[in-house]
Amino acid sequence: LPHYTVGIIGCGQIGTSILTKLLEAQSSFNNLRVLVSTRQPHLLRPFTQEYGVIAEFNNERVIMEADIVFVCVLPG
């Protein structure tokens, strides 16, 4: 079965909401993999431990590896 990778850049309120909804619906997908990137390195381990996702401090990796990317950052 093919796997799908969903990336989330920015894990504030909106990014985390998308993440939790994806994980709730994970059983509906075949081989769903979630990769998140945050600009706050102290959140990497909590995201990995609490949600069981791959957490990075690297937006480029998320863009390169994900089939679908949610960009959840403030404009600026």
Image: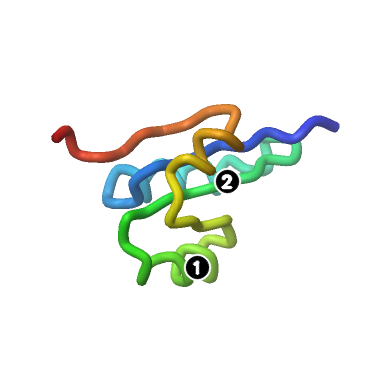
Q: CA distance from mark 2 to mark 1?
A: 13 Å
Q: Residue furthest left?
A: 76
Residue depicted at 44% across the width and 65% down the height: 44
Residue topped by disc 1: 50
Q: Is residue 56 left or right of residue 25?
A: left
x%, y% of residue 48? 53, 65
Rendered view: 45 above or below 19:
below
Residue depicted at 53% across the width and 43% down the height: 61
Which quarter of the rendered picture does the C terminus lie within? top left
How packed mark 1 is, by other alpha carbons closer than 10 Å (few <14, some 14-19, many 20 or more), is few
Q: Nearer the viewer, residue 72 or 57?
A: 57
According to the image, what is the colour scheme of the structure? rainbow
* Secondary structure at numbered mark 2: strand
Judged by depth in the image, the label closer to the viewer, 2 or 1, is: 2
x%, y% of residue 11? 35, 51
Rendered view: 40 above or below 74:
below
Q: Is residue 34 left or right of residue 75?
A: right
Residue 28, numbered circle: none
Q: Nearer the viewer, residue 33 or 58?
A: 58
Q: How many marks?
A: 2
x%, y% of residue 2? 80, 30
Q: Is residue 74 left or right of residue 59?
A: left
Rendered view: 53 above or below 50:
above
Residue depicted at 31% across the width and 62% down the height: 40
Q: Amino acid at mark 1?
A: Glu
Q: Amino acid at mark 2?
A: Val
Which quarter of the rendered picture does the N terminus lie within? top right
* Secondary structure at numbered mark 1: helix
Residue depicted at 34% across the width and 46% down the height: 10
Residue 34, numbered circle: 2
Q: Is residue 34 left or right of residue 36?
A: right
